[in-house]
């Protein structure tokens, strides 16, 4: 299951059709990043570059030149090199990217400084996303300056530099059918991995054991990488929103929160489940859990085309505030507590974010300063939580240190939304049943 060559080609054509007349887009691939001396972090392609090419090697550069008769789609890539390939692996080389990735032409990356200024010259707008890679920014400006230095000989440097993201990220925000199918697979793999972690959880094991259960689940079903560092926080560690130490011993009587999702064919899943280490919720844990779940279900039901981005979040705020009042963690009038933001002592993040090639995916949340309406094809997470700080002296001691988040991935449809991550239970009874069955 992959995005087809023709879909990658259609993405490039669509982008070129919206670019200014007589413009060029420059989109660099990611580079390898050193981890220590001569070893690197696992390579992750730049999402914009991947979206337009499907090409997974480092160091390439894609050039889109709408209207260029000799070819509109060019790539610079690593040249074939038998010695380097013996050490570091196969390379497509220019011939391979023309043949297999639909480029009109391709050249070795070492030839860029000779070739690119000539391609930019005479184009009035350069689309380029600055600020992500200093040395590549300098290289791009070096090319433009080479043209500027020759104005007296009639050379025409570009007048405008425009952020490619403005066009491209709107395209990435709306998922195609093929993208939704791939995201469904990423979600299924991730859901299965969460079920594995629930089955393999025992008091006395360490959080990183569950991290490895998750990783095992991903790999077992076809996803080698996590989309982000897995969060496995037991007890009060669940109250640290992006906890990634994952090195505590899990205690009988505590909850454990796992926030983990795989990357499949470039696309992320992002799931959180919170469950009891020993398989049975205490009364307090369950009371908080059920408030979070109620808010999450209400937000999912409220996720529909035409509703504003902020609407599901507002729904979670109301249900959580009501629940906190019912449990005695907050007191007062619900509307006033919402107005004053009193709930933010317990629920301090937003209900979700766009999801796609990046786990916190691209796309504007506001248009002209106003929350944008949801549209079919948008993918987002819905992930409310309640976190009772251990030092919150305003609440009864029995609540302190409980942290719960429940996160699912949804895609907006014509009439509502589809939950991609339904494969992992979230009703407290279902979780207890799954854990009891192992
Ligand atoms: N895993 C990060 C998040 O849920 O946003
Ligand atoms: Mn998450
Ligand atoms: Mn998330």
Image: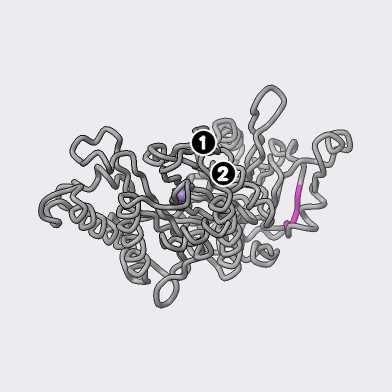
Q: In the picture, which quadrant includes the N terminus?
A: bottom right
Disc 2 secondary structure class: helix
**Helix, strand or loop: magenta stretch:** loop
Distance (Cα) linking label 2 and label 1 = 9 Å
Q: Position of residue 357 (x, y in %)?
A: 55, 54
Q: Is residue 307 above or below residue 111?
A: below
Nearer-the-camera pick, 62 or 71: 62
Instruction: Indicate yes or no whether the magenta region holds residue 104.
Output: yes
Nearer-the-camera pick, 175 or 388: 388
Q: Is residue 319 above or below residue 62?
A: below
Q: Is residue 202 left or right of residue 265?
A: left
Q: Position of residue 165 (x, y in %)?
A: 48, 51
Is label 2 within 8 A of ligand 2 (CB to nearest ligand atom)?
A: no
Q: In the picture, which quadrant includes the C terminus?
A: bottom right
Q: Which residues are magenta?
A: 102-106
Disc on the earlier residue, 2 or 1: 2
Nearer-the-camera pick, 364 or 309: 309
Nearer-the-camera pick, 75 or 117: 75
Callouts 2 and 1 close, C-beta under 8 Å: yes
Q: Is residue 62 left or right of residue 333?
A: right
Disc 1 secondary structure class: loop
The residue positioned 51% from the left and 36% from the top of the image is: 246
The residue positioned 53% from the left and 52% from the top of the image is: 198
Q: Which residue is mark 2?
A: 210
Q: Is residue 195 left or right of residue 117?
A: left
The residue positioned 53% from the left and 37% from the top of the image is: 204
Can residue 121 be seen here? The reply is no
Number of marks:
2
Specify how the rendered protein is coloured.
one colour
Q: Which residue is mark 1?
A: 246
Q: Position of residue 141 (x, y in %)?
A: 56, 35
């Amino acid at each position: 299951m992959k995005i087809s060559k023709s879909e990658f080609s259609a993405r490039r054509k669509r982008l070129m059709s919206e670019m200014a007349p007589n413009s060029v887009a420059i989109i660099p691939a990611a580079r390898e990043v050193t981890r220590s001396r001569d070893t690197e972090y696992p390579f992750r392609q730049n999402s914009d570059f991947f979206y337009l090419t499907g090409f997974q090697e480092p160091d390439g550069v894609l050039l889109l030149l709408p209207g260029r008769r000799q070819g509109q789609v060019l790539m610079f890539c690593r040249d074939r090199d038998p010695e380097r390939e013996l050490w570091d692996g196969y390379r497509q080389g220019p011939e391979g990217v023309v043949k297999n990735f639909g480029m009109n032409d391709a050249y070795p990356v070492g030839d860029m400084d000779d070739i690119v200024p000539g391609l930019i010259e005479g184009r009035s707008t350069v689309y380029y996303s600055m600020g992500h890679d200093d040395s590549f920014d300098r290289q791009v400006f070096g090319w433009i300056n080479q043209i500027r230095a020759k104005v007296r000989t009639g050379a025409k440097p570009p007048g405008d530099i425009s952020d490619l993201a403005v066009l491209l990220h709107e395209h990435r925000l709306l998922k195609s059918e093929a993208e939704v199918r791939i995201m469904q697979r990423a979600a299924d793999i991730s859901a299965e991995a969460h079920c594995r972690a629930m089955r393999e959880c025992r008091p006395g094991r360490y959080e990183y054991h569950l991290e490895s259960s998750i990783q095992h689940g991903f790999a077992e079903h076809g996803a080698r990488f996590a989309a982000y560092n897995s969060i496995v926080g037991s007890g009060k560690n669940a109250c640290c929103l992006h906890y990634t130490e994952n090195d505590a011993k899990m205690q009988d009587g505590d909850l454990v929160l796992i926030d983990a999702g795989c990357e499949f064919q470039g696309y992320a899943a992002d799931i959180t489940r919170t469950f009891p280490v020993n398989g049975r919720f205490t009364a307090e844990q369950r009371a908080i859990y059920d408030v979070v779940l109620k808010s999450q279900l209400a937000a999912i039901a409220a996720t529909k085309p035409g509703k504003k981005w902020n609407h599901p979040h507002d729904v979670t705020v109301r249900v959580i505030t009501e629940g906190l009042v019912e449990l005695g963690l907050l007191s007062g009038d619900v509307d006033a507590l919402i107005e004053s933001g009193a709930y933010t002592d317990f629920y301090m993040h937003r209900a979700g974010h766009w999801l796609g090639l990046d786990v916190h995916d691209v796309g504007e949340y506001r248009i002209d300063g106003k929350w944008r309406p949801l549209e079919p094809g948008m993918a987002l997470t819905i992930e409310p939580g309640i976190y009772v700080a251990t030092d919150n002296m305003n609440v009864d001691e029995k609540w302190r240190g409980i942290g719960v988040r429940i996160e699912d991935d949804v895609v907006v449809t014509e009439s509502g939304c589809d939950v991609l991550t339904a494969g992992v239970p979230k009703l407290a009874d279902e979780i207890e049943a799954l854990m009891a069955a192992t």
